Image (spheres, coloured by chain):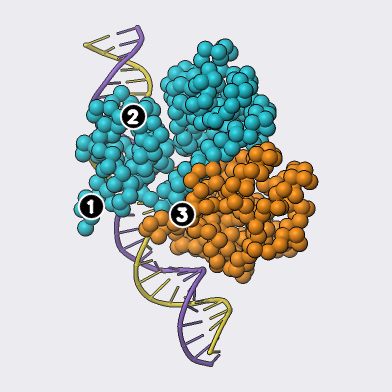
Chain colours: A orange, B cyan, C purple, D yellow
Amino acid sequence: MMTLGTTLTRRTLASLELFRGLLPAAQQDVVASARAQRFIRNARIFNQGDSNARAHVLLDGSVRISQSGSDGAQIVMRLIAPGEMFGTVALFTDHRYPADAEAMTDTFEVSWSGADLLKLMQRHPQVATNALKIVGKRLQEAQDRMRELSTQRVEQRVAHAIVRLIRQTGRETEDGIAIMFPLRRKDIADICGTTLYSASRILTAWEKAGWLVTRDQRLIVRKPSEIRRIGEDLRGLRRGKGIA
Amino acid sequence: MMTLGTTLTRRTLASLELFRGLLPAAQQDVVASARAQRFIRNARIFNQGDSNARAHVLLDGSVRISQSGSDGAQIVMRLIAPGEMFGTVALFTDHRYPADAEAMTDTFEVSWSGADLLKLMQRHPQVATNALKIVGKRLQEAQDRMRELSTQRVEQRVAHAIVRLIRQTGRETEDGIAIMFPLRRKDIADICGTTLYSASRILTAWEKAGWLVTRDQRLIVRKPSEIRRIGEDLRGLRRGKGIA
DNA sequence: AGTGGGATTTGCGCTAGAGCAAACCACTCC
DNA sequence: GGAGTGGTTTGCTCTAGCGCAAATCCCACT
């Protein structure tokens, strides 16, 4: 536990999606009940099945939310960028986290207990509607991914995943749009429901085509338009090549 | 438009997941801003992309929520049973429905405008937390299905879909648990992200094994335990048959 | 420079399951 | 009865992509 005064000011608070549009008094209220924590790279923030779920907001770093089945098969539900909330779904059901959260880099987060967040929402309805907006958006995204998983082929799914990551954290640099998460091939695979091998094959093909590069575990997209095209098109680079 | 007095009493209202736990005054408030509507079988309640989304609650019948891509590939996001809310996700984003809603049988529903629901939530925070609970549960379910889609094979997914439908609307009868939605093979296929052909093959195999029957488009499960086993097991009836 | 461990690439064989075509079945409407 | 319609079953072919194994690369550490 550390003092929040210096790190979570009311000003930074207002920039978090969950607490947007709050009056100063409410902001004070929110800060008062928060708890801050640091995690180093690769540390678990919480585990699938843990009870007493809290509401988390990431202030710095990046977090991977993943589920893994009994057979070891893993799937990445979502990557969390600074400012986003995570782990909140459980608060309204059985208070057990439905997934693992792991720090992909050194991270800094704040969290609220379920009871505190509930009280906050009762006192400040704006927090509740913010939360609804966020969860609703995530549900839509999940549904989009479900549709992709059941109708599209691997290549298109990888393309869509990249487009989505760009939208989430894309940053313009001199040689392309950089995705700020450190991504291993396995991460990509687990995001779009395929294997390490397929993901590797596809990404190296795209690297050879000059559409992107991986530098220091970051993906840098040089030809976003090509990637986007693959996502929409029926056939991609590896096969066909001509629309026929 | 019809009068609600006779159909949507404050009493039935309290049984709807969205309006659980409200005080009488609040209930009055809710009923006042509702609009009721009937739809016949196969009619569209709303279409993907329609704006001015409303919040819907189904009172009677069953509704299929589905998305279809430009290529015609369709996927069923969810089937709605009486008492459940639907179409609400859009209310907190761009007010456009992200999916189609179609009446699978003759239906009767009530709905609220986005603005009205927002006002209700401001006045009665309970409505907002109810909504969060519901959307949260749906998100969890969507995530489960995503994991299934990316890690499990078709047979297991079909089994899980049936288990889920039983949980949602299963009704004990003398010769098994009946699922109350009228389900064509295509529906099953679109629910678990496979083709009509595969779904048909699997279901007839199970029928031949005596695990279930289809009568009048309703699925009646006679051996739920077997179905559940398939969902967990690695190999099913059609292949192997021995655990080896 | 040497060594060990994680990540990545790539060749290859194999199968789950998509997808087409054709038959079949149950109903309804002339 | 016959034709039409919508759903279902089933045989057959073909391929996307899984999954193993082996090679390679890239570090960090000694």
User: Which element carries disc 2, helix, strand or loop?
Assistant: strand
Pair 2/3: label in front? 3
Image marks 2 and 3: residues in contact by CB distance under 8 Å: no
Amino acid at pointer 1: Gly
Q: Which residue is mark 1?
A: B240
**Residue A195 place in picture, x, y as percent:** 44, 59
Camera-side residue: B119 or A80?
B119
Q: Which residue is mark 3?
A: A49
- Determine if residue A167 is in view: yes
Q: Which residue is mark 2?
A: B171
Residue D20 figure quarter = bottom left
What's the residue at 47%, 17% (across, down)?
B40
- Determine if residue A227 is in view: no
Pair 1/3: label in front? 3
Chain of the residue on which disc 2 is drawn: B
Asked if residue B141 lies left or right of residue B130, the reply is left
Chain of the residue on which disc 1 is drawn: B
Please, is residue A61 above or below residue B64 in the view? below
User: Which element carries disc 1, helix, strand or loop?
Assistant: loop
**From the image, which quarter does the C terminus of chain B lie in?**
bottom left
